[in-house]
Amino acid sequence: MRTTYMAKPSELTEKWWVIDAEGQVLGRVATEIAAILRGKHKPTFTPHVNCGDHVIVINADKVVLTGKKLDQKHHQRYSGYLGGLKKVPYRRLMETHPTRAMETAVKGMLPHNRLGRQMMKKCRIYAGNEHPHQGQKPEPWILQK
């Protein structure tokens, strides 16, 4: 009888990937990032283990939203108090905090528990073309079109 392989955290190796989001659709890039953070691209994927790789996203300010989403879609946050719901249209969000749109899109695609928070720590998002992680020797990730 065969047993299913379960990866142990001590056996895992982590790589660093760079994703250039310039001209890409927000949701399509976010799904790729979430899959890398979860480790679904590896043959040793185990759902309950943080077996994903580190991801560096550059040019997050040049990401594209299709249709009329820039004006019709809103970014919401809630303080927990009565009347504390804040809604910001994505057009203003992309002007003021361009990395926040990518961050919330990826975060919503990860597990909503301790494991998902650990995975999100491996994601670094930058608005510009530069990043301070050259020492980790990140490799470019080619996005599916």
Image (tube, rainbow, N blue to C red):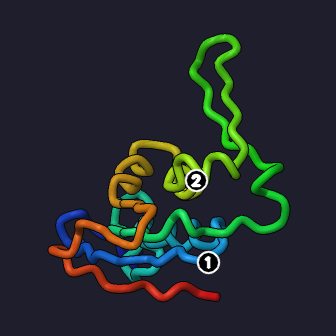
Q: Is residue 130 above or below residue 137?
A: above
Question: Horizontal and vertical percent for residue 2?
Answer: 40, 81
Picture quarter with the N terminus: bottom left
Q: Residue at x 35, y 51 (%)?
A: 118
Q: Secondary structure at mark 1?
A: loop
Q: Residues within 10 Å of mark 1 (few under 14, many from 20)?
A: few
Residue 132 is left or right of residue 91, and the answer is: left
Q: Which amino acid, mark 1?
A: Gly
The residue lying toward the viewer, choosing from 114 and 123, is 123
Nearer-N-terminus badge (1/2): 1
Q: Identify residue for label 1.
A: 23
Q: Identify residue for label 2.
A: 101
The residue lying toward the viewer, choosing from 66 and 3, is 66
Question: Horizontal and vertical percent for residue 109?
Answer: 58, 57
Q: Is residue 96 above or below residue 55?
A: above
In the image, farthest residue toward the top = 82
Q: Residue at x 66, y 46 (%)?
A: 92
Question: Horizontal and vertical percent for residue 22?
Answer: 55, 76
Picture quarter with the C terminus: bottom right
Residue 97 is left or right of residue 4, and the answer is: right
Q: Which amino acid, mark 2?
A: Ala
Q: Is residue 6 visible?
A: no
Q: Residue at x 38, y 85 (%)?
A: 140
Question: Horizontal and vertical percent for residue 14?
Answer: 25, 73
The residue lying toward the viewer, choosing from 10 and 55, is 55
Q: Is residue 87 above or below residue 72?
A: above
Q: Secondary structure at mark 2?
A: helix
Q: Residue at x 33, y 59 (%)?
A: 122
The disc at residue 96 is none
Q: Residues within 10 Å of mark 2 (few under 14, many from 20)?
A: some
Q: CA distance from mark 1 to mark 2?
A: 15 Å
Viewer-nearest of discs 1 and 2: 1
